[in-house]
Amino acid sequence: MSYFRKLEPGLSNLMELFSRDERWLIVVNADPDAMASAMALKRIMIHRVADVGIARVNEVTRPDNLAMIRYLRIPMMKLTPAVIAQYDRFALVDSQPHHHPLFKEMHFSVVFDHHPLSAEHPVVVDFKDIKPEYGANSSLMTEYLYNLGIRPGNRLATALVYGIKTDTNSFEREFCDIDVRAFRYLSKLSSQLLLSRISRSEYHFGWLDYFARGVSSMHKVRTGYFTYIGEVPNPDALVVIADFFMRVHEIRWIAVAGVSEDKLVIIFRGDGVTRDLGRFASMQFGQVGSAGGHKAMARAEIPLEKLEGKDAEMYVFKRLLMPRQRTRQEKAAPDLKSDPEQKSDLEKKSGPEQKSGTNQKSPPESTSVPAMKSGSDQRSGEK
């Protein structure tokens, strides 16, 4: 029995796309899993094409991501029209063409991803391998390296291990047998010292103020929580805060919102059981912006112009409370009901003029979060 699945005839079809006369650009929305996947695909392509580069559509600001780039020497450039003009063909990893506005403007020949497929946005490319059941795209790329007989070097193996570790949250989120096999196989080839250096670079000092805002503005929303951070220089801060709050025992899922540049960004994190957050984000925010993700982690981005001058915090809060069709899994999970007479601070804050803007009443189970206890009852943590 093979350690990984056999990839023929698909692997041969992929190899036939590569020509020594063409320059390829691998495009990512840079996070650990995407960067590791890009490194793996570059290793596969390096001796089969004229040149291969890696470009990102986002700014990298998280300390752990910056540490990964620095310690593993990942060569990446910002995606610009000038960069695009230098290449003949394009590949996309850990994402799909409809996931980012800049992706929609490009013609991709290859797509590797593990996010859910969308019936409204079919992926039409020369070659694609999309495995939504995989916990990390790095696991998928490890299969291709293995089938091609490519033994990952120390830095590449370390990147892939870290990609699997972050996207599965150390196997606390959804994963499959391939993720476990890939992690075990790569661990023997990776550097524990480099992994330790990368994973310990977690916070910017300036982000501590955002944590304080997150605690002070947190509100109960049905079976989960919502907090509004306000303006942030980069959405990465919202991701870190959402991951942090999921270490709190009583929090089953949370939505952390903030404004970055001209967008309202909402980051969802959960236990993967109480609510399918990818579906929830898509249903509540898909009509006003881009939204989607996995059961335990999702994201929504809304242009500020769509708010039409409404208060951003109240806008998100009311959309989280809008009626929706519950999944069978959610119907089976018991809801935690709170005092029907109790209203959250946000509900009290919304006057008649705000309520008329959406014609949406807040359900009775929304309550304000109690003050955090001091001493041993207060817990913290980070991904």
Image: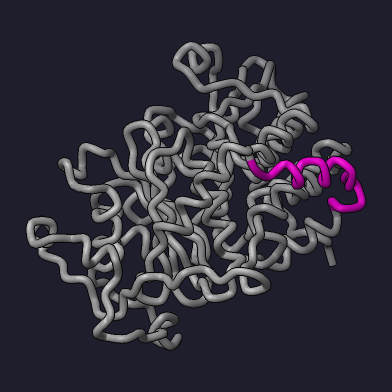
Considering depth in this image, is 243 or 129 the residue closer to the camera?
243
Q: Residue at x 78, y 56 (%)?
A: 182
Considering depth in this image, is 160 or 127 the residue closer to the camera?
160
Q: Position of residue 37 (x, y in %)?
A: 67, 41
> Which range is magenta?
186-203
- Left or right: where does residue 9 sit relative to residue 122? right
Q: From this viewpoint, is residue 274 visible?
A: yes
Task: Reply above or below: 135 against 337.
Answer: above
For residue 198: magenta?
Answer: yes
- Left or right: where does residue 243 sit relative to residue 324? right
Task: Reply above or below: 281 against 328.
Answer: above
Tally of marks = 0
Q: Residue at x 58, y 40 (%)?
A: 93
In the current view of this chain or complex, which residue is farthest to the front?
374
Q: Position of residue 127 (x, y in %)?
A: 55, 41
Task: Reply above or below: 10 against 217.
Answer: above
- Quarter that holds the C terminus: bottom right
Considering depth in this image, is 303 or 377 the residue closer to the camera?
377
- Quarter that holds the N terminus: bottom right
Q: Position of residue 331 (x, y in %)?
A: 38, 85
Considering depth in this image, is 314 or 97 the residue closer to the camera?
314
For residue 57: magenta?
Answer: no
Q: Residue at x 51, y 37 (%)?
A: 126
Q: Residue at x 50, y 17 (%)?
A: 84
Q: From this viewpoint, is residue 174 visible?
A: no
Q: Quadrant of residue 256?
A: bottom left
Q: Quadrant of residue 44?
A: top right
Q: Quadrant of residue 339?
A: bottom left
Task: Reply above or below: 142 against 68.
Answer: below
